[in-house]
Image (cartoon, rainbow, N blue to C red):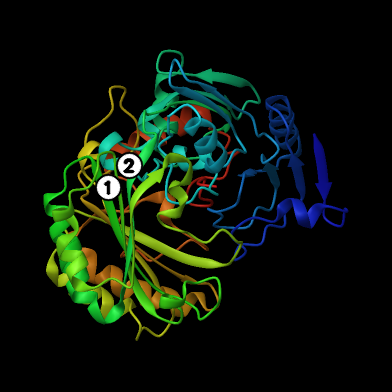
Amino acid sequence: MQTFFAGDVGYDTEIAGFQTGVAHRPEMVVAASSADDVVEAVRTARARGSRIAVQATGHGARVPAVGMLVTTRRMSGVRIDPVARTARVEAGVRWSVVIEQAAAHGLAPLAGSSPGVGAVGYTLGGGVGLLGRTFGYAADHVRALDVVTADGNLRHVTATSHPDLFWALRGGGELLGIVTAMEIGLVPVPVVYGGGLHFDAVHAAEVLAAFRELTETAQETLTTSVGMVGLPPVDAVPESLRGRHVLHVRLASTVPLEPSLLARLRAIGPLVDRVGEVPAAEVGSIYGDPDFPHAYVGDNVLLGELPPELLDAVPVLAGPAAPVPCVVDIRHLGGAMARPPETPNAVPYREATHILRVLSPAADVDAARAVHHEVFAAATPYAVGRAATFGYGPVDDDPSLPALRDPATAARLAQVRKEVEAEDVFLSVADANICS
């Protein structure tokens, strides 16, 4: 275990994360390499009277850590059991490593669109995956968790050993302890059928209408989404897309796609059409999310329906003419995500049919939030809630945003927190997003 204090060589490097818009300045940093290190860190924090934040990759940082920051990126062990179709994943592992190792056995985890995100934090927040409609949330596939609780003890948490804590950790989005490792189920998917189609923003109305129609008829084997973003005129962007504001329709299916399924989209005239077979090890290419640290701010609403009126409003409010650059992402939910797993967990709002996300560079947080709030106001009549792990940058305290949890889930989480974290050692979800 290494420790750092402000002014020490290596302090700034250790606290740096993917989200550069939130600058940690903790009194003490513990660079953990094992579960024993985490146990020692929690006991030290209790003795010092310090609250604890945790960072693996830092994708989900929301507020600066000021007491103790435990970094887990050195906890990088992955063990695949191809017979049991499981993986044991330590706290600092990124999805890219799990994806690659599982793919060697024809298996896949329920990872999301960004392979660089930390696997544990993503899963604890629920985990909206590339194949979510087919297999459910990532949290639905957790078999066991090794957790250092606020009393400084390491516990093996399962449905039988600690049922309430096991329920809460899987999708609750609360930092109720530091998970040092998790065991997850894998699915037999050696190849994904899908990819993406890019369209110029002048076709936004047609593309969004076609996307909506696609989601109305899609089988559970297909999970799809549409993004809107302005692309810079740089060499890293394909020549046909440089400097354009585009819509990106993304598809991921466990069975081959029928040509008729894409006929309407292709008739619009995509600038780029990259739909085909995607090896499981290369699924990160479907979205092509940024893999470099940067500052961003954003939030989301979960929708009970996706009406044409909302799809008409979104390009106007957050499209090329918006006063700040916006990235819009609408993902189709439902299917297996609508059904609770065999062992229930804390993932709320399973009735949601879509999630609408908006994020922007954090150059001017107030200006970005003003635009985002207009989008969310247009979505309010159709909103059922909000996802805790798709909040980015400083916490947005706008009371008009939907709740992060339904009342029953919130009440049970509060009770579990009272039982295992009464001394308020860890930062709560209101202070820091654990999806990192």
> Which mark is on residue 365?
none
Residue tagged 1: 223
Secondary structure, mark 1, is strand
Query: Which quadrant would the N terminus be assigned to in this image?
Result: top right
Q: Is residue 301 left or right of residue 151?
A: left
Neighbour tally class for label 2: few under 14, some 14-19, many 20 plus, Cα within 10 Å: many
- Residue 384 in the image, given as x and y percentages of width and height: 22, 53
Q: Which residue corresponds to the image point at 69% horizontal and 56% vertical from the top-left?
A: 16
**Are discs 1 and 2 less than 8 Å apart at CB?**
yes
Q: Is residue 344 above or below residue 65?
A: above
- Residue 149 in the image, given as x and y percentages of width and height: 58, 27
Can residue 381 be seen in this snapshot? no
Rounded to the nearest whole Å, what is the CA distance between mark 1 and mark 2? 6 Å
Q: In this view, does 49 lie to the left or right of 217?
A: right
Q: Which residue corresponds to the image point at 54% horizontal and 43% vertical from the top-left?
A: 96
Q: Which residue corresponds to the image point at 67% horizontal and 34% vertical from the top-left?
A: 75
Residue tagged 2: 131
What's under tag 1, amino acid-wise?
A: Thr
Q: Is residue 6 above or below residue 243?
A: above
